Amino acid sequence: GNSVTQMEGPVTLSEEAFLTINCTYTATGYPSLFWYVQYPGEGLQLLLKATKADDKGSNKGFEATYRKETTSFHLEKGSVQVSDSAVYFCALSDPSGGYNKLIFGAGTRLAVHP
Amino acid sequence: DTGVSQNPRHKITKRGQNVTFRCDPISEHNRLYWYRQTLGQGPEFLTYFQNEAQLEKSRLLSDRFSAERPKGSFSTLEIQRTEQGDSAMYLCASSLDLINYGYTFGSGTRLTVV
């Protein structure tokens, strides 16, 4: 079935380090891909998205490129801050049933220390 | 627009009791979703509505769970005869254009069954 696999956390980095969080997917059809972020004590917020192959989504210094050939949507940031500490979820629009809902990965916790 | 609102924020109940949660979506969003999230996991789809019609239910949604969205506005999720395994965060999200904008999530209702 359609699914999302994320790298296991926690990912622990020093401030200003480069961040990569891996996300791969399995899906029929042409899903849209999303990254959501959940800060401590808050709900999930949309971070960025890409709707077709080779699209690059970007927001707040984060980027991810929709790679159909490798079925991946890895999240990157060139220089992380302590305030980026959160749980990051990769998601896709589910092709089964007409792309009407999102399927989420298990999440990757990021901890950035000064 | 105040975003997606969920009430209550926390609910502690004894096993066997019934509980009901409420979600008020963004007013112009025609789609409303319920998800469940347990510790260390990503959100799992439960059900969704387009306007007042419930269009899909997950196999996770046992007979003890029921959801409604009268008049296509707010929604309620009821769990009857709660079990300890029902303890989780219940998330509501709404959307107008899933493919291009994804969901807007509420802050969730945390259920603890004792």
Image (tube, grey):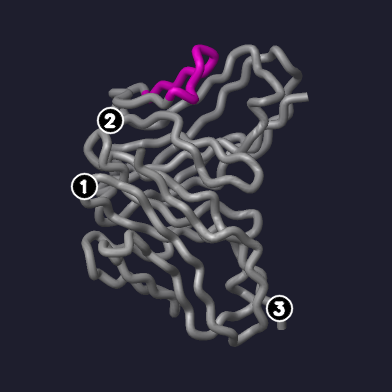
x and y, in percent, of residue A22 in the image: 47, 65
Q: Which secondary structure lies at badge 2?
A: loop
Q: Say which residue label 3 marks.
A: A113
In magenta stretch: residue B68: yes
Q: Which secondary structure lies at badge 3?
A: strand
Compared to residue A67, the image places residue B21 above or below, namely above
Q: What residue is at 35 percent from the left and 49 percent from the top?
A: A26
Q: Amino acid at mark 1?
A: Gly
Q: Which secondary structure lies at badge 1?
A: loop
* Number of the front mark, 2 or 1: 1
Q: Amino acid at mark 2?
A: Asn
Determine the CA span between mark 1 and mark 3: 40 Å
Q: Quadrant of the C terminus of chain A?
A: bottom right
Q: Are marks 2 and 1 in contact (CB under 8 Å)?
A: no
Q: Amino acid at mark 3?
A: His
x and y, in percent, of residue B6 in the image: 53, 39
Q: Name the residue furthest front.
A: A70
Determine the CA span between mark 3 and mark 2: 45 Å
x and y, in percent, of residue A87 in the image: 58, 60
Identify the mark at residue A29; answer none if there is no mark.
1
Q: Chain of mark 1?
A: A
Q: Chain of mark 3?
A: A
Q: Nearer the viewer, residue B9 or B45?
A: B45
Side of A57 relative to A78 (left or right): left
* Number of the front mark, 3 or 2: 3
Q: Earlier in the sequence, mark 1 or mark 3?
A: 1
Q: Chain of mark 2?
A: B
Q: Say which residue label 2 marks.
A: B51
Identify the mark at residue B112; answer none if there is no mark.
none
Q: Are marks 3 and 2 on the same chain?
A: no
